[in-house]
Amino acid sequence: MSKMSSAVVGMFMCIISSHAFAQGDIFANNSAFYKLKSEVMKGYSPNIRPVRNISTVTNVSVTFKLSAISEISMTRQMMSQALYLSVSWTDEFINWNPGDYGGATDFLVRQKDVWVPDLAFGPQVSSTSGKLGNDDLHVRLWHNGTMIWSPHMVVESFCAVSIVKYPFDEQSCNWYLYMMSSDKRHVQLTGQMSSNVFQALIAENVEWELVTITDNLFDYQNDGLRLSAVSFTYLLRRRPGFLILTVISPTVMLSLLSILVFALPVESGEKMSLGVTLMLAFVFQLSFVTSVLPPSSLQTSILVVYLLVLCSCSSTSVLLTVAVLSLHHRPDSVPLSPSAAGFVRLLHSCGRIRLTIEKPQTPETSRRILSNTSLAHLGTEQNARQINQLHGNGGSRSRSSGRGIANVTWPDVAVACDYVFFRLFLFVICLASIICFSLMVF
């Protein structure tokens, strides 16, 4: 029993001893860390560029990684993106031997406690200065003097969009990082795109496809200073599937329906209502498209021009429908010009239209009709002459019909006009569609 108690007490003492040693190591490490931070940062000024020789140039390297493109607004001409940067440089005032401080190779300090390059992004659409970072952001210090600063941000930058080929358009949007006040003789900016920038994307944009990203270093002048900057350019291609279903397809279907106004018979009584309805539909489509595009006078969208052509054709078809209805309901007492009658007969002879042909009356038919009317009770000489004249006209009409010459009426002229207008508008709309869509797609 005593041996068992001794074993338990020994085990308990071992646990206490190991815990005490562990606590001692943690305390020693913390002491080394606090000693490191206090000694390294002693006398450090974040307002002084970290070089021992003022003629030494501080090279600031910027590695760019894109997280997501959240929005590209056509009306505001703005691109919103989530990204993070890895900014590194060498601080000649920061260095230590890790062995003297418990093997510590790095530690974090607040951005406001060390020198950081005065970087800003542009062109921004908001009223902010665009300066990177904030006081709560940390900078990692390495024992060899390397400083790593990783500001994460959501950037809203200006993007001049091109609306000519909408919705089959490609946009080239660029933004840049620049030194706000550090001359290139003192701070030199170098930038590079991350090799896995496409893999770093959290989610693809549902409307835009990121094709390429390029970077470019350049200098600019400001207040007599030569400042360093780096630009990043995105080539974005729109995914047109949704707009094809919601804009292009309805527009094409409406354009085909607008031609059918001239195929609808006058007797249906719906020619005018169909034409006006289609004209209003084109106006609505035009209003919708212009509402999602910037009000630019420098560029004109081909789709807007196409819709204007269709609106013009629809308006013209309404006016021509009024003319066709007027011709159809014109009384027979109004004489028909020989040229109009000849044109209608030409279309009839080609088999393009059918004319309203009255059945000729033979003398026997005329006698049968007259025998059933009150003319049979009129025995005057004048009525007899009218009967003989009617017999002669009937024979003449019969002979004319026998030669295949039909009587042309005003409804026949209206049908001929509908035939011509149908073919004419079919040609114009098909030609406009082929030209506009070829310019948009290719």
Image: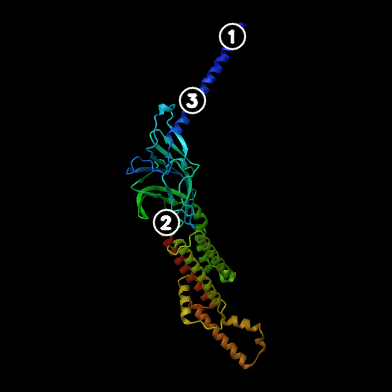
What type is the residue that disc 2 sits on? Val
Front-most of 177 and 231? Answer: 177
Is label 2 or label 1 in front?
Answer: 1
Q: Which mark is residue 6?
A: 1
Q: Are marks 2 and 1 in contact (CB under 8 Å)?
A: no
Residue appearing at x 46%, y 40% in the figure: 113
Q: Secondary structure at mark 1?
A: helix
Q: Is residue 356 visible?
A: no
Of labels 3 and 1, earlier in sequence is 1
How many other residues sit within 10 Å of disc 2, few (<14), some (14-19) or many (≥20)? few
Where does residue 441 sit, x and y in percent of width and height? 42, 56
How many other residues sit within 10 Å of disc 1, few (<14), some (14-19) or many (≥20)? few
Q: Secondary structure at mark 2?
A: helix
Q: Secondary structure at mark 3?
A: helix
Is label 3 or label 1 in front?
Answer: 3
What type is the residue that disc 1 sits on? Ser
Q: Which residue is mark 3?
A: 28
Of labels 2 and 1, earlier in sequence is 1
Work out whether 114 lies above or below 302.
Answer: above
Q: Which mark is residue 441?
A: 2
Is label 2 or label 3 in front?
Answer: 3
